Image (tube, rainbow, N blue to C red):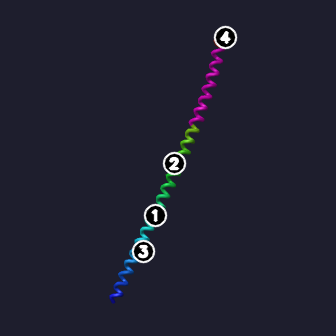
């Protein structure tokens, strides 16, 4: 009977250690997956933000270029009108 009790206690101790190892492994896997997911999301959000910033800069540059071209054309036309008035 004494050997049976010692055997059961030994089995419980071993199973507690196994359960503890499983819990620790699960924590490790869960934190690894969470860390990987957060890192991936961070990189994706950063890439999207960079693309949006690049697109916004492109649109602003294009709009500025269009406005500058229109201003140059208007300036050129007014210069021609001024030249015609001065020659009269």
Relative vertical location of residue 47 with respect to residue 28 in this rendering, above or below: above
* Image point (54%, 45%), residue name: 50
Q: Where is residue 58 in the image (x, y as percent from the top left)?
A: 58, 38
Q: Do the residues labelled 2 and 1 touch (CB within 8 Å)?
A: no
Q: Nearer the viewer, mark 3 or mark 4?
A: 3
Marks 2 and 3, how far apart at CA: 42 Å
Left or right, 62 with reference to 41: right
Q: Name the residue under label 3.
A: 18
Which range is magenta? Answer: 60-83
Comes first in the chain, label 2 or label 1:
1
Q: Mark 4 points at which residue?
A: 87
What element does badge 4 sit on? helix
Foreground disc of the pair 1, 4: 1
Residue highlighted by disc 2: 46
Q: Do the residues labelled 2 and 3 touch (CB within 8 Å)?
A: no
Whether residue 79 is in magenta: the answer is: yes
Circle nearer the N terminus (4, 2):
2
Q: Distance between the residues labelled 3 and 4?
A: 102 Å
Quick one: SS at disc 2? helix
């Amino acid at each position: 009977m004494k050997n049976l009790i010692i055997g059961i206690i030994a089995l419980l101790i071993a199973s507690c250690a196994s359960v503890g190892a499983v819990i620790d492994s699960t924590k490790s896997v869960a934190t690894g997956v969470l860390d990987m997911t957060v890192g991936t999301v961070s990189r994706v959000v950063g890439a999207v933000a960079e693309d949006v910033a690049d697109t916004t800069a492109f649109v602003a540059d294009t709009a500025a270029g269009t406005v500058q071209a229109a201003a140059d054309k208007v300036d050129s036309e007014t210069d021609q009108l001024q030249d015609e008035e001065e020659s009269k």
